[in-house]
Image (spheres, rainbow, N blue to C red):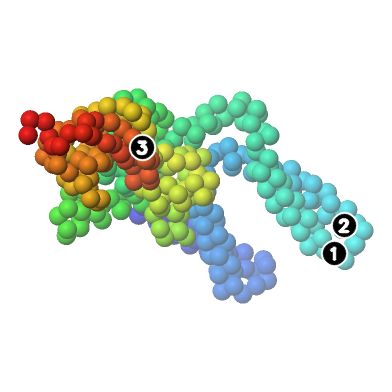
Amino acid sequence: MKLPTVLLVRAMVVALSAWAGVELAPALQVPITAGAVGGAILGGVAVWLETRAVGVPVERLFWGTVGGFFGIIAGLAIGTAVASLVPNAGMAGVGLPALLGAYLGAATALRRRADLEPVSAVLFPGGRRGELSKVLDTSVIIDGRITDVCEAGFIDGTLIVPQFVLGELQQIADSPDTLRRNRGKRGFDVLQRLQRSRKVKVEITDADFPHVREVDRKLIELGKTLGAKVLTNDYNLNKMAELSGVPVLNINELANALKPVVLPGEAMRVQVVREGKEAGQGVAYLDDGTMVVVDHGRRYLGQAADVVVTSVLQTTAGRMIFTRLRDEDGSGPRGA
């Protein structure tokens, strides 16, 4: 349902609940105003529970309901025994054990859901879909490399794009800043390419978490709810998701892992393009963007040089290769 339709239905639920409260007020011997307010509150609670249930896997709802049902039965049995022993306990003597039994039963079933996995595999053969789903964040959509990774067949399952991510993408596309506006438009182009791809399925979800303001936090909550992985290239979101126990796929880490492996002692030929930070150093770059620091390579500035790898340093920003000139005895570039 579209958002205005959803809001209209929710408003009707609250209004009908208030009307039912007015009709029940005489039977409950309470003022009509109190009945209307009470009915509206119950309708509001129902709407709130509905918003919280959006995106919750059916498997979790099923086991929570089953656990709650048996918990109510056990609670009613205990409540009946209490009522027979303490006649003055009244409805509270029966209702409270039933309520606590429902809570305990549902909570226990959900916490021990792993032990029920064999039964879930039979009842919900598609229940492991969430494990194959990836929630896309705004940065990885704008980045665009995800389309090439998907076309290569390295990403399977369903790519989930939340409406709040589309909203953030729209804000970027509407920005007065030209660069940000182009980035936003690029993001929508990337989504269209993904939707046309036969290698993956793209799903737009209305699932939201109104009590959470930050988009990154919403992504993590959605990943938890769906049992899905978060696909990003944002370093901060990556760390936040890991701390929250949500699996992360980072495109930057994938790119770094696919860079050619070089070992100390290996020879290569590079083009020195600028000076290094230390005296006499030169800096070159491989085709994949990896920085190569050439010791005593300043005199080869703007020219090609034969070098030998001395060490490789892996950092959060990428990989750096340290080298020395292959012919350290040379006084200058060959042919000089």
User: What is the CA distance from the residue labelled 2 to the residue labelled 1?
Assistant: 8 Å
Residue at 31 percent of width and 38 percent of height: 321
Name the mark on residue 312: 3
Residue 106, how many percent across, how many down? 68, 46
Residue at 7 percent of width and 34 percent of height: 336
- Name the front one of labels 1 and 3: 3
In the image, 259 versus 141, the foreground residue is 259
What amino acid is found at the position of numbered circle 3 in the picture?
A: Val
Q: Are marks 1 and 3 in contact (CB under 8 Å)?
A: no
Judge left or right: residue 324 versus residue 164: left
Q: Are marks 2 and 1 in contact (CB under 8 Å)?
A: yes
Residue 7, how many percent across, how many down? 40, 56
Name the mark on residue 82: 2
Residue at 39 percent of width and 54 percent of height: 215
User: What is the CA distance from the residue labelled 3 to the residue labelled 2?
Assistant: 73 Å
Judge left or right: residue 277 versus residue 65: left
Q: Are marks 3 and 2 in contact (CB under 8 Å)?
A: no
Judged from this view, the residue extending furthest toward the left is 336
Disc 2 residue crowd, few under 14, some 14–19, many 20+, Cα 10 Å: some
User: What is the CA distance from the residue labelled 1 to the residue labelled 3?
Assistant: 76 Å
What amino acid is found at the position of numbered circle 1 in the picture?
A: Ala
Q: Give the mark, 2 or 1, whose residue is nearer the N terminus.
A: 2
Disc 3 residue crowd, few under 14, some 14–19, many 20+, Cα 10 Å: some
Residue position marked by numbered label 1 in the rendering: 89
